[in-house]
Image (spheres, helix red, strand yellow):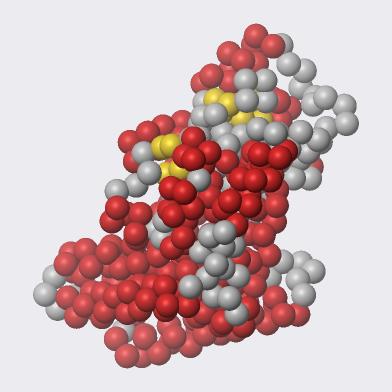
Amino acid sequence: MSRQKQAQLKKSVSTFANADMRASIIQLINTIIPFFLLWFLAYQSIAISIWLSIALSIVAAGFVVRIFIIFHDCTHGSFFKNNKANKIVGTITGIITHFAFAKWKRDHAIHHATSSNLDKRGTGDVWVMTVEEYAAASFWGRLAYRLYRTPIVMFGLGPIYLFIISNRFNRKGAKRKERMNTYLINASLVGIYALLIWAIGWQALLIVQLPILFIAGSLGIWLFYVQHQFEDSYFENEEEWDFVKAAVDGSSYYKLPKIMQWMTGSIGFHHVHHLSPRVPNYNLEKAHESTPPLQKATTITLASSLKSIRFRLFDEASKSFVTFKEVKELLRKRKLNVQLTPGRSSFQEK
């Protein structure tokens, strides 16, 4: 695709980057109110059946994912036209989803600016090693990466890490506004949980809240993972990296059933979102349907997305992801040295 066509493509999508106050308010109403209602019903159902309570919590977890998409849009400044409104709603939804608004806003902006750039990994993204980096890594480096990429760690321990550690602490060198926002959200969570324990007891709180957080966290990580980790995903070094290609070829169109598309705030149109982050979630599908070139993006379904679990390392030679099993044969054929090409640093060194 020529530079001219790329510019035209960005311009075409940017026409949908307009927040609609009415649409945003409706989304807040049909998302947050049902969540709190389901939370209350899950609590009340404990007296009938713990399993009924857990079932309601699972449904509530879906609404937490949808609330997170609202939070996500607020970090991009796309949910409302007014920046202050985005910050207020983003902080409130950050409390509900347990995400630090200002901290995540910064990290996620870096993710968008560096997505699919092999030389700028490490902030706001999933850890990806290339075949060459894996070959050059120490035993412990390989072991750490293998553990990280296992479903149990990524989707099981991942939510725990996000909620308890990653979002609770500020990064080194964070500015005062960013630090204060994290403190505000942390203090709010402490106060809310203290109040709930006093009101309903810690046992009831765990029965209702634990499944909600765990399932919502796992689903969120899965969505983030699968929309960049597909077989022929785009990854390039800095000198060859291109923003539009990274958006269209490095992000997938996750074609979900309509109810799941609604619950996930249409984030499956991830290629559209990466091309123009200021497009609010309720306009993503319109942008996709109105822009023919975007309809050629890699499309994955629920069934085909499960294959991404096997993809572990990015092979720069074939420009595709490979499995740990396949990498052994690749290394044998190429007889790679244990050192990377001079001048290139490994991910761990960055």
Q: Is residue 105 visible?
A: yes
Please determine whether, in this image, residue 190 is positioned above or below residue 302: below
**Nearer to us in this view, 68 or 174:** 68
Please determine whether, in this image, residue 331 is positioned above or below residue 2: above
* Residue located at (29% from left, 71% from top): 207
Residue 214 % position (x, y): 39, 61
Using the rendered view, name the quadrant where residue 198 is placed: bottom left
* Residue located at (36% from left, 39% from top): 301
The quadrant of the rendering that contains the N terminus is top right
Q: Is residue 127 visible?
A: no
Please determine whether, in this image, residue 317 is positioned above or below residue 179: above
Residue 261 % position (x, y): 35, 54
Please determine whether, in this image, residue 289 is positioned above or below residue 171: above
Using the rendered view, name the quadrant where residue 80 is placed: bottom right
* Residue located at (50% from left, 45% from top): 291
Which residue sits furthest top?
333
Residue 59 % position (x, y): 27, 64
Residue 272 % position (x, y): 53, 50
**Nearer to us in this view, 245 or 66:** 245
* Residue located at (46% from left, 49% from top): 290
The quadrant of the rendering that contains the C terminus is top right
